[in-house]
Amino acid sequence: MSLWYRMGADGCVTLTLHIQPGARKTELAGLHGDALKIRLAAPPVDGKANAALIDFIADRLEIARSAVRLKSGQSSRRKVLEVSGVAETRIAGLAA
C-alpha cells in the first residue's frame, strides 16, 4: 500500500495530495513525498482550484462528483480528500 492513500474501515479512501494550481494544464505529476502531485490549470482563487480538483478526481475515477469530499487543506497546497464508492485498485491506478 502506498503512503498517499489509505483505505478506511468504512469503505472510504483518504487521499493525500500536493496541488500546483495555475499550471498550464490539469494533469497527474507523480509522487511528491508522501502525496500524489496534481497540477491544476485552475487559479487558486475563490475555490476554483478546489472545485477543479474534485472534478478531476471524480472524472479520473469515473465516479460521481458527490463521492469526493475535500476533508482538509481548503487554502493549502496540501489537501486531503475523502472518496467513497471506489475500489483500491482504481485509486492505486491514479499514480501508475
Image (cartoon, helix red, strand yellow):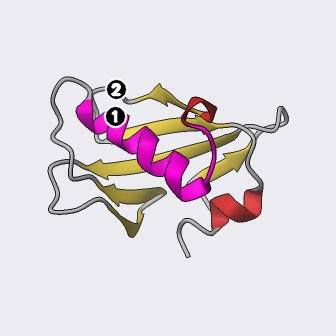
Q: Nearer the viewer, residue 78 or 11?
A: 11
- The residue singled out by tag 1 in the image is 50
Q: Residue 74 carries which label?
A: 2
Question: 79 left or right of 41?
Answer: right
Which amino acid is tagged 2?
Gln
Q: Is residue 24 above or below residue 22?
A: below
Magenta stretch, residue numbers = 48-64
Which amino acid is tagged 1?
Asn
Mark 1 surroundings within 10 Å by alpha-carbon count, few (fewer than 14), some (14 through 19), many (20 or more): many
Any part of residue 28 in sight? yes
Look at the numbered disc 2 and give the secondary structure of its residue: loop
Q: Which residue is drawn at 48% across and 29% down?
A: 70
Q: Residue at x 51, y 52 (%)?
A: 59
Residue 91, x across and y down, in percent: 65, 58
- When asked about the image quadrant of residue 43, the answer is top left
Mark 2 surroundings within 10 Å by alpha-carbon count, few (fewer than 14), some (14 through 19), many (20 or more): few
Look at the numbered disc 1 and give the secondary structure of its residue: helix
Asked if disc 2 and disc 1 are in contact, CB closer than 8 Å, the reply is yes
Magenta stretch: residue 47 in it? no
**Residue at the far bottom in the pictured view:** 96
Magenta stretch: residue 53 in it? yes
Q: Which residue is drawn at 61% across and 53% down?
A: 62
Residue 21, x across and y down, in percent: 21, 47
**Residue at the far right in the pictured view:** 9
